[in-house]
Image (cartoon, rainbow, N blue to C red):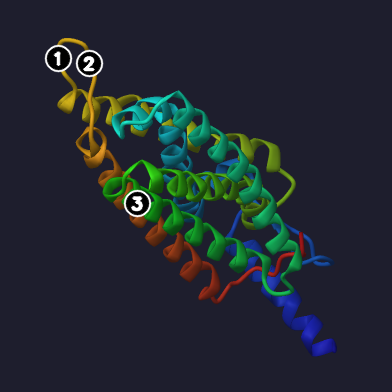
Amino acid sequence: ENKTSDGQKEDISLLKRQENVTCSEDSFIIDYTLYDTLTKPEFWLLFVCLAIGMGTGLTIMSIAARLCIAKYGDDISIDLFVSLLSISNCFGRILVGWAMNRSEGDKVILSLKCLCACLVLMAASQLLLYISNLTFTFIAAVFIGTSYGGFWTLNPSLVMALFGESHFGKIYACMNLAPTVGSIVLSKYLSSYVYSMHANKQDLTCAGNKCYGLLHLLLAASCVFGSFCGLIMWHRISGSHSRIIFERL
């Protein structure tokens, strides 16, 4: 036991020398400052994952009416699509939170697995929107809402687990810029550009899968790229020799 304790103290001393962080010998937890966090690849990998995943969800929400109309839907279809997004959003938050609480393994690794799964689910929903008619659009809405809600549950838990609690507020505030950046790039610019390419120049209306087909493919590709970023982060954390032992959340 003394050898184990001495080994832990040596690990803590090594981490203190390698990283400019606050480290407690009792709990063996590292708390990064805001500056140190912003220099970590893990922060930016997580930022990209959330910007893509949450930005994709916000993009679909912003074009919900036009999307349903382009697939020859009516006002009832629009209401149903938006309702499914809202309900599944709540379900996704509860599902991911429940899975986190039920697990007895490493919370950080489980969170990263859930993050990758949400990105893959979001990519699948975009492919479904690309190839489907109005009926399957409602199924895609469930996938989108579930994954989008999961991102909001994973965001604070991953920020706290990866970067500590002491500066959680400031770090979490910076991380919350991710959905804003994703929404601006994907919704305001990309979706508008793709729609204007196929819309009638006179009344700016469009019908058929061609209206947002290219957008769905680009969003699906972005989500696949985001999932690879999640896998890189997973590999960096699980394979690091200076792995930090975190308290259970």
**Mark 2 surroundings within 10 Å by alpha-carbon count, few (fewer than 14), some (14 through 19), many (20 or more):** few
**Mark 3 surroundings within 10 Å by alpha-carbon count, few (fewer than 14), some (14 through 19), many (20 or more):** many
- Kindly indicate the quadrant of the structure image that contains residue 216: top left
Q: Which residue is mark 1?
A: 201
* Secondary structure type for disc 1: loop
Mark found first going from the N terminus, 3 or 2: 3
Mark found first going from the N terminus, 1 or 3: 3
- Specify the amino acid type for callout 3: Leu
Whether tag 2 and tag 1 are in contact, CB under 8 A, the answer is: yes
222 over 6 or under it: above or below: above
Expressed as whole percent of the image width and height from the top left, the position of residue 76 reads 48, 28
Whether tag 3 and tag 2 are in contact, CB under 8 A, the answer is: no
Front-most of residues 217 and 106: 217
Quadrant where the C terminus is found in the figure: bottom right
26 over 64 or under it: above or below: below
Q: Is residue 147 left or right of residue 24?
A: left
Q: Which mark is residue 204?
A: 2
